[in-house]
Amino acid sequence: MFETRVLTTLDDLPRGQWDALFGGALEGFDYLRAIEAAGLAGFDWRYVLVHRDGRLVGAAPAFITDYRLETTFEGQGRRIAERVRSLAPGLMTPKLACLGSPGTETATVGFAPDLPQPDRAAVLTALIRAFEDDAARSGCVLTGVKDADHAQAELWSRATAAAGYSPVPGQPIADLPIDFSDLDAYLAGLSSGARRDMRRKLRSRSGVRVELRSSLGADLPRAMALYHQTLARASAQLETLTPAFFTEVASRMPGRAVFVLYYAGDDLLAFNLLLEDGEVLLDKFFCMEAERGRAHNLYFLSWFFNLERCLARGLKRYRSGQANLGDKVRLGSRLTPATMYFRHRNGLLNGALRALAPLVMGDPLEGLAA
């Protein structure tokens, strides 16, 4: 009924065919092609296609990498995993094939718009089978799904369960509806404590110069230094971006990608990569020099700058990602759950991982207010 194909580059597929399945998603063909062209170390790219009667009806990106299992765990779970690594390092760095992309918010399956709902489960089943066959040929012992799209939660849950995958909670994604008329109305909706704190932090604006750019240009080396400082502070990161990533996004997504640069005097202290599509402002990366950036409250100034951009451009939603969730909830964001799935080709190890995961995975929602 279905024919499947796995590509190693999007250059082998017309842009329009891919984007027709994803409804013009911000992280569509151009963004994925920018990731592919960025030269990220340690990654091989896959694009899984499903055809029916010669017509493309389903697709999803995927990747292959050597994966350090402890990056998935939190707290005590990570300490246990690190001890296991000291005893069996090979076990803790399996070759992983994963549906989704290290650089996108969710793993989303694209479907032909006129594909009936009952057929979508069959398409996803065929897609997973083709993905697993390619993973086996590539020597991958672990397969997974990175942050399955919550809008497709039921579809992912059924298809992965039938294929023997186990679910684990991923980091939720923060969204803020732009349902207020101006910043005063927004602030009025916060708690009194948050409102006072934000008004105090906004006084830092007078000491900060903000520039809006279509590319990083001559500031790229300094921006990369800020990126690496920010990366060093992160608890876990799957990929390490390159200068080419930022130049590729800028060149491939004109009018949809913008850089916001924050200066104190002539010193660049932070930058923010934003993507937008007329409905959503997607905050991809905020990178900051820690000490001086905090002194100028740059994280919070960027938050308000982005809200002002949403208001000025009539955008309906500010999606700010999966980091700093406590601050984002305090600032009015709603959290959308994310689920990851995994399966080890070795049945015994798969059973052990399935039993171990609930014990060592931290609850990403623990300690966060609803």
Image (cartoon, helix red, strand yellow):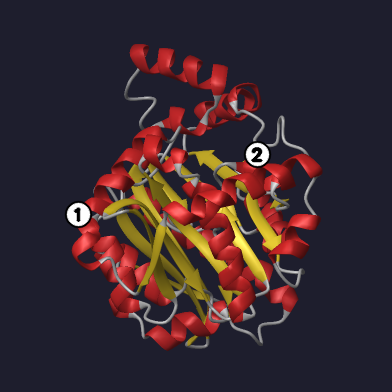
**Is 222 placed left or right of 75 in the picture?**
left
- Position of residue 266 measured from the top left corner of the image (x, y, whole percent): 26, 55
Type of residue at label 1?
Answer: Pro
Q: Is residue 250 visible?
A: yes
Asked which secondary structure carries label 2, the reply is: helix
Number of the label disc, if any, that sits on residue 221 = 1
Residue closer to the observer: 84 or 132: 84
**Is 297 placed left or right of 93 in the picture?**
right
Q: Which residue is mark 2?
A: 326
Q: Is residue 6 visible?
A: no
Q: Residue at x 39, y 84 (%)?
A: 15
Q: Residue at x 60, y 50 (%)?
A: 163
Q: Residue at x 54, y 59 (%)?
A: 107
Q: Residue at x 50, y 33 (%)?
A: 72
Quadrant containing the N terminus in the rendered view: bottom right
- Position of residue 295 measured from the top left corner of the image (x, y, whole percent): 45, 38
